[in-house]
Image (cartoon, helix red, strand yellow):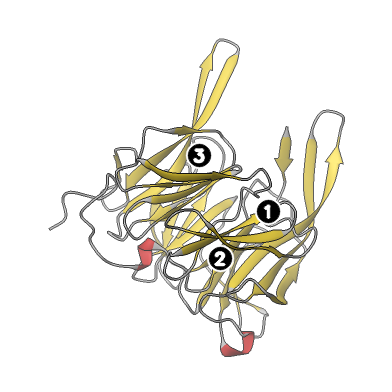
């Protein structure tokens, strides 16, 4: 069994002209780890983290951030373009700090975290942080743009989440565990939660998934793009399968949409970026080389598509509220 020992400080990076970051550019968060083995299990202990800048064509530009992580609980080191000016990065420790334009740490943002698994913003500039503290103990915490806590939700978001454009519906993979005598079965189901009313909604699909790391994103039509292990699939707003692709070389951590959601990026274990057409899953570009030994943990596109940043009220799809005016 593989265990990842990583970290969870969120840095707020203010994107400026000096940084050279443009809409559509990529930021890839990675780490260099050492493999510890005790004869039974492997522990991958990170010794350095960094963030690399690539242009919209996937060409490496420069390394924009490096640091030494403080090993804590399992996390995905998410990096997220909240808007076209602000990027959040979960890097180390248990606190949130702003990163000034000159790269120096700034004021503290929000409270303490234990293991950040994903970040998402809404149309009002609020930020939701998924803090996974073990099975049955997770929280999603809503902050305003200044880092003040606005609300808390008892949700186990261990892998990924996304906010629908209705500003209320959170879609996320939920870990399910069942014991049958000495046999324990685990699987992911894709669930939905109404943040506005603090209530569960019907699941997005009846499909169940292996407990590999899962990343998902809501598409403009209300459907989902899902990365689960080495498989990517697109599902319609009704939850039916549109297409699927499998690549045994896929890293299970990186899934990012371009600003129009017309294409998406993934990363591979063999240190490459791949770009696919969202409509049919066809390969558009790649493999494009990334830093050898990067160990990509997460990535984001500057101004990339996230449904929650669009305050519109779609009327189709199982994850859309029916009580809207």
- Helix, strand or loop for disc 1: strand
Q: Few, some or many C-alpha atoms within 10 Å of disc 2 (few <14, some 14-19, many ≥20)? A: many
- Residue 214 shown left or right of residue 323 in the figure: right
Tell me how far mark 3 sits from mark 2, CA to CA: 27 Å
Q: Few, some or many C-alpha atoms within 10 Å of disc 3 (few <14, some 14-19, many ≥20)? A: few
Residue matched to label 3 = 137
Residue matched to label 2 = 300
The answer to whether residue 228 is above or below residue 26 is: above
Mark 1 near mark 2, Cβ–Cβ under 8 Å? no
- Helix, strand or loop for disc 3: loop
Between disc 1 and disc 2, the foreground one is: 1
* Residue closer to the observer: 59 or 9: 59
Residue 112 location, x and y as percent?
A: 56, 57
Residue beneath the point at 25% across and 65% down: 312
Residue matched to label 1 = 268
Considering the image in quadrants, where does the C terminus appear?
Answer: bottom left
Residue 62 location, x and y as percent?
A: 72, 78
Residue 278 appears in which quarter of the rendering? bottom left
Mark closest to the chain's N terminus, 1 or 3: 3
């Amino acid at each position: 069994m593989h265990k990842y020992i990583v970290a969870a400080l969120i840095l707020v990076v203010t994107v400026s002209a000096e940084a050279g970051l443009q809409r559509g550019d990529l930021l890839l968060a990675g780490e260099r780890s050492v493999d510890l083995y005790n004869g039974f299990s492997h522990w991958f202990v990170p010794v350095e983290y960094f963030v690399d800048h690539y242009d919209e064509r996937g060409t490496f530009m420069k390394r924009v951030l490096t640091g030494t992580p403080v090993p804590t609980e399992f996390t995905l080191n998410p990096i997220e373009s909240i808007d076209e000016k602000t990027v959040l990065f979960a890097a180390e420790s248990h606190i949130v700090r702003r990163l000034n334009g000159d790269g120096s740490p700034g004021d503290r943002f929000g409270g303490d975290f234990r293991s950040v698994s994903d970040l998402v913003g809404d149309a009002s500039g609020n930020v939701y942080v998924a803090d996974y503290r073990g099975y049955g103990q997770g929280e999603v915490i809503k902050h305003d743009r200044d880092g003040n806590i606005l609300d808390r939700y008892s949700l186990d978001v261990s892998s990924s989440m996304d906010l629908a454009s209705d500003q209320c519906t959170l879609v996320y993979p939920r870990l399910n565990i069942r014991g049958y005598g000495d046999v324990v079965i685990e699987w992911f189901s894709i669930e939905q939660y109404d943040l506005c009313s603090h209530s569960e909604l019907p699941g997005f699909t009846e499909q169940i998934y292996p407990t590999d790391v899962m990343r998902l994103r809501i598409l403009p039509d209300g459907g989902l793009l899902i990365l689960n292990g080495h498989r990517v699939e697109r599902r319609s707003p009704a939850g039916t399968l549109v297409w699927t692709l499998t690549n045994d070389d896929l890293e299970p951590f990186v899934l990012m949409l371009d600003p129009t959601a017309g294409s998406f990026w993934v990363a591979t274990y063999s240190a490459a970026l791949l770009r696919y057409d969202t409509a049919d899953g066809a390969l558009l570009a790649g493999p494009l080389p990334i830093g050898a030994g990067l160990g990509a943990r997460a990535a984001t596109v500057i101004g990339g598509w996230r449904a929650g940043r669009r305050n519109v009220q779609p009327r189709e799809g199982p994850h859309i509220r029916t009580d809207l005016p």
